[in-house]
Amino acid sequence: MRVATGTALALILLAALGCGKKNPEAVQQPAPVQVRGATVAALAPEQIPDLQEAVGTVRARNSALVAARLSGTASAVQVREGERIGKGKLLLTIEAAESGAAAAGAQAAVEEASRGVDEARSRKRLAEATFERYRKLYAEQALTRQEFEERRMEQEVAQQGVARAEARLRQSRESARAAGTVAGYGKVTSPIAGVVVSKPVEAGQTVFPGTPLVTVEGDGGYRLEVAAAEGLLGKVRAGDQVALDLEGAPANGRVSEVVPLVDPASRTFLVKIDLSGKALRAGTYGKAYFKTGSRQGIAVPAKAVVERGALTSVWVVGQGGIARLRLVKLGKPLGGRVEVLSGLNAGERIVVAGAEQVTDGAKVE
């Protein structure tokens, strides 16, 4: 029993002596990395606008879908997708034998009606000369009143014949003009200047009235057409500046037109927003954010946000200037800035520029 007690005391003494010695393998903490060139700013509460989102599609302000206006066979297609063309440019030709024959027949009818007018005028001149002779004879009492009245009736009938012939000639000319117009539909031209974006028809294809031939987007720029919720009707007006999100990139636009017709199925109405920029494309998905009020909150520059996969963070600079990466939950974009819903508090300092230079634990100067 005494031996066990002495052994325990010896072990305790040795442990105490060991703790008093300095461990030569202890590693000293390295000095933090110094980061220069990053900009740090303190967060302050601000008025965050309440925004209502509406989605839509980018479209050309002026576009033309050229369709066939008669039946026939498409031939001699003159354009290709992506080609820039001018107004009146020949796009393609449609061969339609029926319309050509109708135009030729209408022109022949015009010629026949013209000859009918000449013939009626000749009869009129003869009837007038005959009536003049009979009038003199009747004045000399060389013929009866019945004969004189018959010659006067012939003169009037001849005058009416000229009028009818001239009317037939006008009718024939209008019919020929209409037939010629229809035949002219075989030469399809562009109604606007712009870029060919679609050409679904190929040479040799049979087309019918209404068949899409070519789509041309004009040079008048682009606009975003969004379906806004019914509750915004009367609050959105032409001329309003609107924050946008086009394929993930923030932008701004101006409301050019509000169509005050609510779709009974979706309970939305159409808003057209003019866009600026040369890198736009029709068919691009976009969002518009309409302001409905404001509240107090926190927002940070979009370039201060660090995205790693599905996580979004910002560099928070604490005591001693040490940067730590902190996860945040973001709200809606605010034109180059983004709202922070959670993860940050007013008064904290964050890296607002040069975030790509910062590493965890670095000292930001």
Image: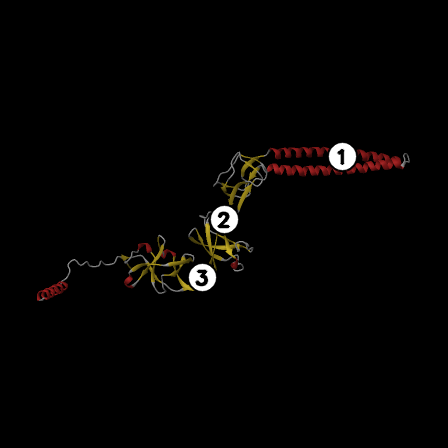
Disc 3 versus disc 1: nearer the observer: 3
Name the residue that disc number 1 marks.
120
Give the class, few, some or many, for how many residues have Cα within 10 Å of label 3's Cα (few <14, many ≥20). Answer: some
Category of crowding for the residue at label 1, using alpha-carbon neighbours closer than 10 angstroms: few (below 14), some (14–19), many (at least 20): many
Dots 2, 1 in contact, CB < 8 A: no
Which residue matches tag 2? 59
Residue that lies at the very extreme toward the left in this rendered image: 3
- Label 3 belongs to which residue? 49
**Is label 2 in a helix, a strand or a loop?**
strand
- Structural distance between the alpha carbons of marks 3 and 1: 83 Å
Which residue reaches farthest front?
Answer: 1
Relative horizontal placement of residue 236, taking residue 161 as reference (left or right): left
Mark 1 secondary-structure assignment: helix
Alpha-carbon distance for marks 2 and 1? 60 Å
The amino acid marked with disc number 1 is: Ala
Residue 301, percent from left and from top: 38, 58
